[in-house]
Image (tube, rainbow, N blue to C red):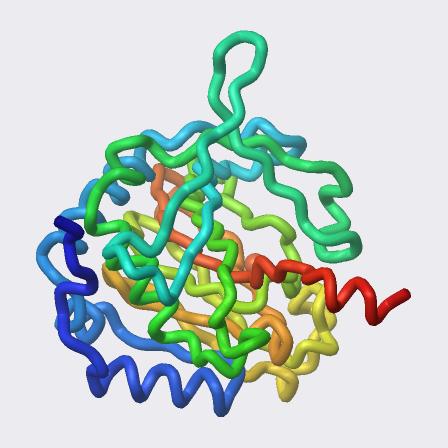
């Protein structure tokens, strides 16, 4: 028999409020204490495992990843809102190279990130995270907080869901730096940042700015173009951005007193997987 998700009955006032704010402002933020009331113990169990995974995540082997202290996993799959079965998110199986190593690829649309014009290769999320029922609930939560008005056809179609588990690690005087190190848009229609763990770091403030300032460093962005300045601190503090309305940025993290520290987040993004029907193709002829 199929397992039913989500475990918590919705709508929940916290979700309603968040979704309305996101629709109204182009971004929304909620503190983890309130999100913890909305999800089940199974999802919290998953969050604990993801936190552990972040501590031992592999260094980003792509150009610039190592010196920026970026450790990360990436998996991508399909999310189906209307799935009759309980499981709504299905990760695509990873590719396997000639040495037997499993990997996923990540390609950003042209012009979105001028640091990377080629595809990047990452390790997929560990199997214990992908198979855990709590993941279903976490992805479902990220979908629930995103208004259907953001998606074509009100998200009736299949969505591509990307999961980035990113642990920025700072050591000594070297900071941990996001990619790109500028305000930017990512191309995915919405991205929800879920704080998993922040240990012994300063910095890492998230900025939400007018979209016109995408691709600029905060030094170049007027203060009055800032829409929000938020530090995700506690477990399950979340921030969602509507990529069509705003750009975002995260300041580097530094280890307190030049020791060691890290900041681990899960990013869940949604983009339509829009099929072209034969009718639509015919209309273009
Ligand atoms: Fe981003």
Task: Where is residue 153? Give x, y as percent.
Answer: 55, 77
Furthest residue toward right: 285
Task: Indicate left or right for 279 with 78 as reference.
Answer: right
Residue 275's x, y, as percent?
63, 59
Work out which residue is located at the far left of the displayed protein and give it: 41
In the rendered image, residue 199, in percent from the top left (x then y), is placed at 28, 48
Instruction: Indicate left or right for 32 with 54 as reference.
Output: left
The residue sitting at the top extreme is 99
Q: Within the image, what quadrant is residue 246 found in?
A: bottom right
Q: Is residue 74 above or below residue 193?
A: above
Vertical placement of 24 versus 132: above or below? below
User: Is residue 204 left or right of 42 when viewed as pictured?
Assistant: right
Q: At 34% from the left edge and 68% from the top edge, which residue is drawn?
A: 238
Question: From the image, which quarter does the C terminus lie in?
Answer: bottom right
Ligand 1 visible in quadrant:
bottom right
Q: Residue at x 61, y 61 (%)?
A: 274
Asked if one can make out residue 72 in the rendered structure from this viewpoint, the answer is: no
Q: Position of residue 168 (x, y in %)?
A: 44, 44
Residue nearest the observer in this picture, 9 or 110: 9
Residue 29 makes an appearance in the image: yes
Which residue appears at 26% of the width and 44% of the height?
51
Question: Does residue 185 appear to the left or right of 177 in the view shown?
Answer: right
Q: Residue at x 69, y 64 (%)?
A: 217
């Amino acid at each position: 028999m199929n397992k039913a998700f989500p475990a918590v009955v919705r709508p929940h006032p916290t979700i309603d409020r968040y979704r309305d704010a996101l629709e109204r402002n182009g971004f929304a933020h909620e503190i983890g204490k309130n999100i913890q009331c909305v999800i089940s113990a199974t999802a919290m169990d998953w969050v604990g495992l993801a936190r552990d995974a972040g501590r031992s995540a592999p260094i980003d082997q792509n150009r610039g990843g190592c010196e920026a202290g970026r450790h990360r996993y990436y998996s991508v799959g399909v999310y189906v809102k209307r799935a009759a079965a309980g499981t709504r998110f299905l990760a695509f199986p990873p590719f396997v190279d000639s040495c037997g190593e499993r990997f996923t690829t990540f390609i950003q649309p042209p012009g979105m990130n001028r640091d990377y014009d080629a595809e990047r290769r990452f390790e997929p999320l560990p199997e214990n995270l992908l198979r855990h029922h709590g993941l279903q609930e976490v992805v479902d939560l990220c979908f629930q907080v995103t208004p259907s008005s953001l998606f074509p056809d009100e998200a009736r179609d299949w969505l591509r869901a990307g999961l980035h588990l990113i642990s920025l690690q700072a050591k000594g005087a070297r900071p941990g730096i996001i990619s790109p190190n500028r305000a930017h848009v990512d191309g995915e229609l919405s991205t929800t940042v879920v704080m998993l763990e922040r240990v012994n770091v300063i910095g890492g403030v998230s900025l939400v700015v007018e979209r016109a300032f995408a691709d600029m460093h905060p030094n170049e962005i007027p203060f009055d173009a800032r829409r929000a300045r938020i530090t995700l601190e506690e477990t399950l503090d979340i921030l969602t951005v509507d990529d069509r309305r705003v750009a975002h940025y995260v300041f580097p993290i530094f280890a307190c007193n030049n020791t060691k520290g890290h900041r681990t987040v899960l990013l869940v993004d949604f983009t339509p997987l829009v099929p072209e029907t034969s009718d639509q193709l015919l209309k273009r002829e």
